[in-house]
Amino acid sequence: EAPDHIVIELEFMYYLIFRELEALEQSDIERARRFLDIQDAFLRDHLGTWISKFAKNVEENAQTDFYKNLAIVSKQFVQSDHTSITDASIATLDALAVVA
């Protein structure tokens, strides 16, 4: 079994976001909601469980500011993404479902 790698995990998130947007473009709110729910679960149960520790480890051990800053930005982005998913995105899709 291949070990997890942050790039693979972030690419999976990209795929889910892309599929959600694709569904929205086709006015398929139910399918968009499913992809949003998968994003939420993945961030909550997987990526979100270790990104803070990973970023802290990189910050403390990186030899250059580039990697230290990349770790900080990555952690903040994942946390911000999860917040936006659990708040605005779900409410927006629910509102669209009522209109549709």
Image (cartoon, rainbow, N blue to C red):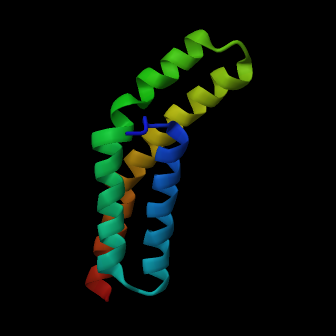
Left or right of residue 13: residue 44 = left
Query: Residue, x 49% and y 18% (percent of image)?
Result: 56
Picture quarter containing residue 93? Answer: bottom left
Picture quarter containing residue 98? Answer: bottom left
Q: Give above or below for 60 relative to 44.
A: above
Query: Residue, x 58% and y 16% (percent of image)?
Result: 59
- In this view of the protein, which residue sits in the foreground, 77 or 97? 77
Give residue 41's position: percent from left, percent from top.
28, 51
Total number of numbered discs in the rendering? 0
Q: Give above or below for 29 relative to 17.
A: below
Q: Quadrant of the N terminus?
A: top left
- In this view of the protein, which residue sits in the foreground, 46 or 90? 46
Give residue 90's position: percent from left, percent from top.
32, 63
Residue most extreme to the front: 1
Picture quarter containing residue 26? Answer: bottom left
Give residue 13's position: percent from left, percent from top.
46, 54
Left or right of residue 44: residue 8 = right
Query: Residue, x 45% and y 48% (percent of image)?
Result: 81
Give residue 65's position: percent from left, percent from top.
72, 18
Query: Residue, x 52% and y 57% (percent of image)?
Result: 14
Q: Quadrant of the C terminus?
A: bottom left
